[in-house]
Image (tube, rainbow, N blue to C red):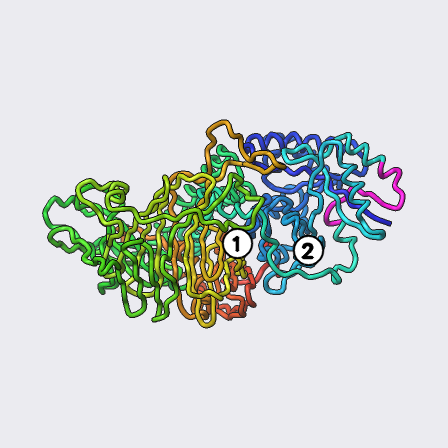
Amino acid sequence: MKKLHLISNAHLDPVWQWEWEEGAAAAVSTFRAAADFCEEFEGYVFNHNEVILYKWVEEYEPALFKRIQRLVQEGKWHIMGGWFLQPDCNMPSGESFVRQILLGRTYFREKFNVTPTTAINFDSFGHSMGLVQIMQQAGYDSYIFMRPDDFAKAPQQFRWRGFNGSELVAHRIVGGYNTLMGEAHLKIENVLENLPDGAQTMAFWGVGNHGGGPSRQDLHKLREMMDRADGYELVHSVPERYFQEIKDTASLPVYEGDLNPRFVGCYTSMARVKQKHRQLENELFLTEKMLSAAAAQGMVAYPAAELHEAVCDLMTAQFHDILPGTLVQPAEEASIRLMDHGLEIAARLKARAFFALASGQPKAGHKEYPILVYNPHPYPVQGIFECEFMLEDQNWKEEISVPVVYRQGERIPCQPEKELSNLSLDWRKRVVFRAELAPSSMNRFDCRIERKMGEPEPDRKPDHGRIRFATDELTVIINAATGLIDEYAAGGVSYLKPDAFCPLVMLDNEDPWRMDALSFPTVVGKFALMDPGAGTDFSGVKDRLLPSVRVVEDGEARTVVESVLSYGNSFICLTYKLPKKGTELEVGVRVYWNEKDKMLKLSIPTLLEGGRYIGQTAFGFRPLPDNGDEAVAQKWVAVEEGAHAITCINDGIYGSDFHKGEIRLSLLRGSAYCAHPIHDRPLVPQDRFLPRLDQGERQYTFWLNGGDKATRQAAVDREATGHNEKPYALSFFPSGDGEQPDSFMTLEQGTIQLSAFKREQSGEGFVIRLFEPTGREQASTVCIPSLGIREAVVLGGFEIRTYRLDVHARTLQAIKLCEDGRP
């Protein structure tokens, strides 16, 4: 006897070809119709997931919401999946995925007293392997997905194995998650025809994508099929019931890896959205850490409601048509506005935490300008830090004010650099300095002013057509004829071929998904160094002719070199920041992009031609394709060969490719908005102007570092966190009042990461989430001196561990990922 579990649903994208208000309207009307059918048709069950839609119904039609609550209790309406929404399942961080589940779990428990055990992401464009451990720790035992719908690496149903040995049963939907109006029975007949005798499976039906769900016509036809059933059984069902009934899941084949690739253009489309998403993700988690340190020491009240609002903004921005960049233009603008709302909340709360944590700092000395830098990370952070401040008075004299930085009375490497303001007056100052910040604490620096005659110009000039920069640790050669890097050597080992950081222009098309391809192989052009006249005009300079490669800053901390390049109607300013200590090269890319149906990539040709290409994913890292196919990764990628490795950290891109040693980072596309391939029809109308994605000014920063493979593997994850969740620097004159707190928390020894430090979802305790980023077992000690806590922890490779900190009881206790009891 064949058995078919009918999963009635209504896939509703909150935004896509429409804005959220239209999505809310569709959700309310669809839910109302579904509730009617649940009450009218005996045995019928409607399934739906996604907190965001239920919240709209709760706000805009509360009577309907109460009906749904009753139907859920009666078993006629099933809360499916239980996440905040269906996010993109590759680009959010591991911590973001935890929050998608945590917010969903909390809402559905509070409003409906249910906890789904089958997770669902029907419509997401590929799925990170890191999801498996997250879902398992959250209490899920099964997962339903659809894409990649042509996935040849795994069967329709399998045991999906993730990091740290985690597993759950995964089911790939065949034939889509929806049906056309009145045609559900045709899909069911087709599934039955192809189902072996004695087997059972699920069939998903209901009108989507803009809502609709079940129809009376479909329900009557399905009733007729049930009444005349011969050799098969049809039941209105829910995913959990199906997974409970299937037998012998232990015999299912095992697949270990990502469920990728799918729609590779989405790793790059709508760069503004992606960068804004990364910024909000970073600022929220950084702000939580600062507020938690302050609140746990009684300095501020934890602003749970305000933070929740900002977290909801982030969760919404991760929706699988927002973050991948497949929206219409008004929805893109609305999504950016949404993220700006979250960023404004985070900015105000971060300042609140900062000023609280500055308590007890001594007053400034005579003629001193204090610079306070808070390091939110529970380990020391080394780097070059920047801060601007105002002089106490405008200086109209010939002498120039030069800031010099001291720490505990000792001068540290520092230099003045061009401030952001362009007032031609010695008043606003920018100082750059190298330091190591103590963990989880406020770091104090004092700036004193020296006077010098005239504005000094960098004296480093090209020699024989090259700008050569060399320290005991680092050698960088910049070609003055190309503006590109010809050599990068760390510790005496060369890692790059010439022409590194060349901006490449790739053949592309109008489709933001890029449904027809797995790669962008065809180079149609390259940005080239501008001649001095054009480069001077582009730079906005009138009184002199500038070389198009020039040293603009040179001091004790670093040397800064600019190159200006062009292609067609587009322009780029490359900025190389070369440190006087260490081997980390910072590269800034300011792009003015005006190309259509083309992609911009940044080429980094390495000497590791046979190397393995890897990239960060949710709570881990994975091997990436080495054949030129487009890959998705998060904050960093790396190439490893033999004893050597080169790592590249970014501040807001996700796509890249790699072949024969060459990394090509994907920056921008020039596709159309929401241009979906349909048969052989043109992708876009050919009779009018159409706006394109990513036109205009964009900025990116990359940090390149080469060295011993073991050292790079151990360091890169913390380095990426440090560059993305930046320590907060501000020139502030403290009152001298209050008690100066010590370092709140440290992770002693090893490289275990702190993913989250926040107040628990319900209660007065705090949540500390750790994870192991290298894939090898590590031991560490969580030390919270003010509470007398020293807790030894051992984490397996890529393992996630969550703890509850009780400040009053002075205890640290392991709990479940979703904060609902002991593990």
As drawn, is 542 to the left or to the right of 620?
left
- Horizontal and vertical percent position of residue 199: 81, 52
Which residue lies under the disc numbered 1?
631
Q: Is residue 239 above or below residue 687?
A: below
440 over 331 or under it: above or below:
below
CA gap, disc 1 and disc 2: 28 Å
Indicate whether residue 219 is drawn in magenta: no
- Determine the residue positioned at 53% across, 54% down: 629
Magenta span includes 235: yes
> Furthest residue to the top?
687
Q: Earlier in the sequence, mark 1 or mark 2?
A: 2
Give the amino acid at mark 1: Ala
Q: Answer left or right for 204 relative to 460.
A: right
Q: Quadrant of residue 165?
A: bottom right
Is 390 above or below relative to 683? below
Report helix, strand or loop for mark 1: strand
Q: Residues within 10 Å of mark 2 (few under 14, many from 20)?
A: some
Looking at the image, which is closer to me, 25 or 66? 25
Q: Is residue 113 above or below residue 64?
A: below
Left or right relative to 354: residue 227: right
x then y, percent, for residue 600? 43, 47
Q: Which residues are magenta?
A: 225-241
- Residue 785 in view, yes or no: no
Residue toward you, 15 or 102: 15
Q: Position of residue 297 (x, y in %)?
A: 42, 56
Amino acid type for the residue under numbered disc 2: Asp
Task: Say what secondary structure mark 2 lies in.
Answer: loop
Foreground mark, 1 or 2, reads 1
Q: Is 210 situated left or right of 355 in this image?
A: right
**Label 1: how many residues lie within 10 Å, few (<14), some (14-19) or many (20+)?**
many
Q: Is residue 236 visible?
A: yes
The residue under label 2 is: 141
